[in-house]
Image (tube, rainbow, N blue to C red):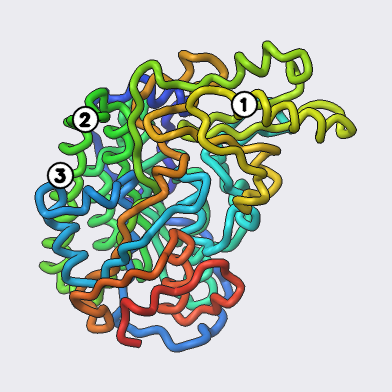
Amino acid sequence: MCRDDNPTHGPTLTRREALAGAGMVAAAGAVGVTLLADPAPVWANPVRPVADDLDVYVIVTDGMRPDELNPAQAPTLHRWASEGTRFTDASSVMIAETLPNHAAMVTGVLPARNGVPANAIWDHAIGDERTLDRPDDLRAATVLDRIRTEAGLTTASVLSKDYLHGLFGGRASVQWAPFPLVPVTDHSLDWFTVEALKQTITDHAPRMTFVNLGDMDRFGHMDLSGTSLRLARNQAVYNSDHKLWDLEQFVRSTGRWERSVLIVLADHGMDWSEPLRLISAAGAIDADPALRGRVGIAQNGGADTFAHLGPAGEREATLARLREVVGALPGVNRLYDPAELDLGERGGDLVATCHPGWRFSDPTPFSNPIPGNHGHEVTLGIPFFIAGGHRIVRRGQVVDRPVRTLDVAPTVARLFGLDHSGMDGRPALEAFHL
């Protein structure tokens, strides 16, 4: 079903509010697709001719770990990877969160250039932290809009998370507004997401589709057995995999499998902490006279970013003291200058990451009660493979060179004949007969 307007979902909850109470079941509802009203009026010629029989799907299994790509937990994904080209050394960009890595996937440039360094930043304009969920937060062109405007082809986004839909608003020819949303997690279950994807394919036949499946991430965050059993997490992995099997049957039954190239990866991994292994930097900062009132904090689960709020002349002294105070907190792993991570101005003035098995909880020790977190170094590793039925996909191949989420956009651009020389990533050409 197509409709002209996005559904109204009510007030947007913060990350801490959304994830702290996660686990409520969504009510059944209709699957909708939104068609943008203003297609590009002028189409340029692509650098190379685009094959008429090519449909590309970028499928993000949100939060999946490399060790979960196995035949017991994910038989469909494991089979796809075995039948295609699997990259064994794949990683996220820092900060290893959802928004910066989805932005990297479709822009091919680092956060300093696309404007999305983390899920949450300290926004000096409002004097508080906020989520980067607005269309104008993304400051670089994406393959979603470039394929639409430069190659004259239909693109689609089918993204399960409300803040992803917000960030990528207006980029694709066809967008699905995630619905129904699970109360307090602000995401649509993978069952609804895959059904919406099938409907989008049926109604609009997009040539490039960007898909996010959020269940692995959302159920992983709340899994209290995550440090050992991972009961909810394992079930979510299996259920999501089964919906992808259903998608494959649909694509095959409609004669589209031989047209398909599947670029499948995660945006980050997942780590679990015990209840008392938390770091609350705000308390230590407030207790220090040299720092009190001079530092803003944006919490991202496995990482905190800190922004200097005092006079410019005091910046160096404040940051030097901040390094001493935060670096001494139990559970802190590393401190970074944001420039080391290519985060740009929105990345703040200092980044702290936690040790495996720890989490940040700011501004209070009760702000982040969820055991599953990411953003820190141990969650950088991801599964990454290229499969599908198209004749250009190489079969049964394993590639050991490093790849990152950044490499998705130049790979897609190469397939559609678009210039990618200005991107920070590089195309994964090993996966294709080109």
Q: Position of residue 49 (x, y in %)?
A: 44, 88
- Can residue 74 be seen here? The reply is yes
Q: Earlier in the sequence, mark 2 or mark 1?
A: 2
Q: Nearer the viewer, residue 181 or 390?
A: 390
Q: Position of residue 45 (x, y in %)?
A: 54, 84
Q: Residues within 10 Å of mark 2 (few under 14, many from 20)?
A: few
Horizontal arrangement in the rendering, residue 64 relative to residue 117 (left or right): left
* 225 is higher (above) or lower (below) than 337: above
Q: Residue at x 32, y 61 (%)?
A: 384
**Residue 392 lies in quadrant:** bottom left
Mark 2 highlights which residue?
A: 228
* Circle nearer the viewer, 1 or 3: 1
Q: Residue at x 67, y 50 (%)?
A: 339
- Distance from disc 2 to disc 3, alpha carbons, whole Å, reads 17 Å
Q: Nearer the viewer, residue 314 or 4?
A: 314
* 74 is higher (above) or lower (below) than 296: below
Q: Earlier in the sequence, mark 2 or mark 3?
A: 2
Mark 3 highlights which residue?
A: 238
Q: Nearer the viewer, residue 387 or 92?
A: 92
Q: Position of residue 430 (x, y in %)?
A: 35, 79
Kind of element beneath mark 1: helix
Image disc number at residue 105: none
Kind of residue indicated by mark 1: Val
**Residue 282 lies in quadrant:** top right
- Distance from disc 2 to disc 1, alpha carbons, whole Å, reads 29 Å
Mark 1 highlights which residue?
A: 326
